[in-house]
Amino acid sequence: MPHKQLYDSHIHITRLPHPRELAQELDRIGYAYTAVACEPGEWETLWELWQDLDLKNKGGNLAFGIHPMAIAQATEPHKAELRRILEQDSGFMVGEAGLDRRFPEYGAGELQEQCFTFQAELALELKRDLQIHCVGDYGRAIALLKQAGFGKTKEGPRPIFHRFGGDAGTARQILEMGGLLSVHASTLTKKSSRMAVAEFPKEVLLFETDADESFVGKFFSEGKPSTGDIAQKLLSELRDVREAAENL
Ligand SMILES: [Zn+2]
């Protein structure tokens, strides 16, 4: 019997080779996850996978959103489409959405911020957890989430900071909003983030691979890995992150 003891809180399964076969293999080995589609062009593909393979009954979940580096692709009709796809299942999360300082027109009130606020408000309205991507501006991300209404009640949707890279003070503010910290291998390479992870109870931690099209190139420099090889690598990566975080 497969054990669902490991949960990958953030994986871009449709960007990995042969996603359908991979999803079947992951189910076989008991690897559960939240699959993220964060560009409009990916939404339908992930939704079809969900339906065809009955992922809901296999311990999976999905997140649909607009990535802060992909907002140029999102039009007004996409916003309506996002709402429609989220309404297909009451468990679907919103995201990944957020702020990224590397974006050329980064700034207060700019398009990226508007798109984040739109998704934060949508998550609250639909009562969904929000997967957050944040690079370089935790202060603003937290302020925008509060402004949208996150953290008003403990039972409300949770902001999940994916690939958490903040310090203990930042983590505290996130937890005060009822949020969660999703730990990636990169989280543990930063001293301040490592200390934050060590400081807070295990219940507020999630673990992730954030595996996407770069995963295969990173871990299999030669030849073409089989679907089974990729699944095993995901499993060992996720297990390593969790063990390293728990042993801090
Ligand atoms: Zn991601």
Image (cartoon, rainbow, N blue to C red):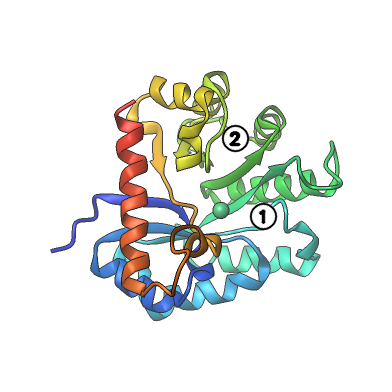
The label number, if any, that marks residue 8 in the structure image: none
The residue lying toward the viewer, choosing from 193 and 225, is 225
Residue assigned mark 2: 150
List x then y, in percent, for residue 11: 47, 57
Does the beta carbon at disc 1 come under 8 Å from ligand 1? yes
The residue drawn where x is 32% and y is 56% is 235
Say whether marks 2 and 1 touch (CB < 8 Å). no
Q: Amino acid at mark 2?
A: Phe
* Total marks in image: 2
Question: Rounded to the nearest whole Å, what is the CA distance between mark 2 and mark 1?
Answer: 19 Å
| First along the sequence among labels 2 and 1 | 1
Q: Which residue appears farthest toward the left when viewing the image?
A: 1
List x then y, in percent, for residue 241: 37, 41
The residue drawn where x is 31% and y is 31% is 246
In the rendered structure, the answer to whether residue 111 lies left or right of residue 146 reads right
Residue assigned mark 1: 67
Assign the C terminus to one quadrant of the image: top left
The residue drawn where x is 24% and y is 69% is 28
Q: Which residue appears farthest toward the front when viewing the image?
A: 222
The residue drawn where x is 71% and y is 42% is 99
The residue lying toward the viewer, choosing from 4 and 75, is 4
List x then y, in percent, for residue 79: 72, 63
Q: Is residue 222 above or below residue 128?
A: below
Q: Which mark lies nearer to you, 2 or 1?
A: 1
Q: Is residue 171 above or below residue 66?
A: above
List x then y, in percent, for residue 122: 64, 51
- What secondary structure is marked by label 2? loop
- What secondary structure is marked by label 1? loop
